[in-house]
Image (cartoon, helix red, strand yellow):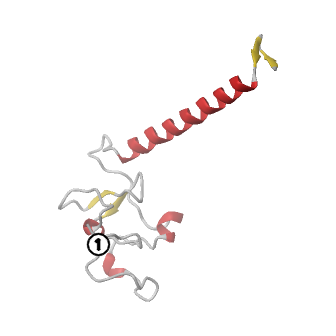
Amino acid sequence: MANLMGATLTRRGALTRIAASGMALLIGTWIGSARAQAPSGNGGALPHETGSDPLGKSLGYTDQATHVDKSKYPTYKAGQMCDKCRFFKGSAGQKYGPCQIFVGKDVSAEGWCVSFAAK
């Protein structure tokens, strides 16, 4: 037992506090992620994914599917685009929209990455 600021702290108490802190961290992360996916005050526009960040590079993201290097990404098939992917959450006719893969960023409806999964 330790005496912490006049209160006795037991092992059970310490574990309870650690667990509560961990849950608070997880809930805070979940809320932050939900806010990143939610439409912002500027008409729902999030920053655009450019493919230059580590996630974009690792997934071969390009904002124009017609520019995919087919020798580097042999899984690409003509006609695959973000607006036809199940992870794309933009509305029909939208040029950019949110993606479940690129949380907090909008992707081009005409873009592509290796995570493409047809709707």
Q: Position of residue 27 (x, y in %)?
A: 49, 36
Say which residue label 1 marks: 81
The answer to whether 33 appears left or right of 89 in the picture is right
Residue 78: percent from left, percent from top: 28, 83
Viewer-proximal residue among 25 and 99: 25
Q: Amino acid at mark 1?
A: Met
Horizontal relation, residue 51 to residue 46: left or right: right
Tell me where residue 110 appears, x and y as whole percent.
28, 70
Placement of 41 over or under 97, stated as above or below: above
- Position of residue 111 relative to residue 19, above or below, is below
Q: Residue furthest bottom?
A: 71
Q: Quadrant of the N terminus?
A: top right
Say if 117 sits above or below 36 in the image.
below
The outermost residue toward the right is: 2
Residue at the spot x=39%, y=41% of the render?
35
Q: Nearer the viewer, residue 77 or 18?
A: 18
Q: Residue at x 41, y 61 (%)?
A: 49
Instruction: Give me the residue at 59% from left, 36% from top.
Output: 22
In this view, which residue lies farthest toward the left? 93
- Which quadrant of the figure contains the C terminus? bottom left
Decide: few, some or many residues near mark 1? Use Cα within 10 Å; few <14, some 14-19, many ≥20.
Answer: many
Is residue 109 toward the left or the right of residue 3 in the image? left
The outermost residue toward the top is 6
Q: Secondary structure at mark 1?
A: loop
**Image x and y of residue 2, in percent:** 82, 20
How many circles with numbers are drawn on the protein? 1
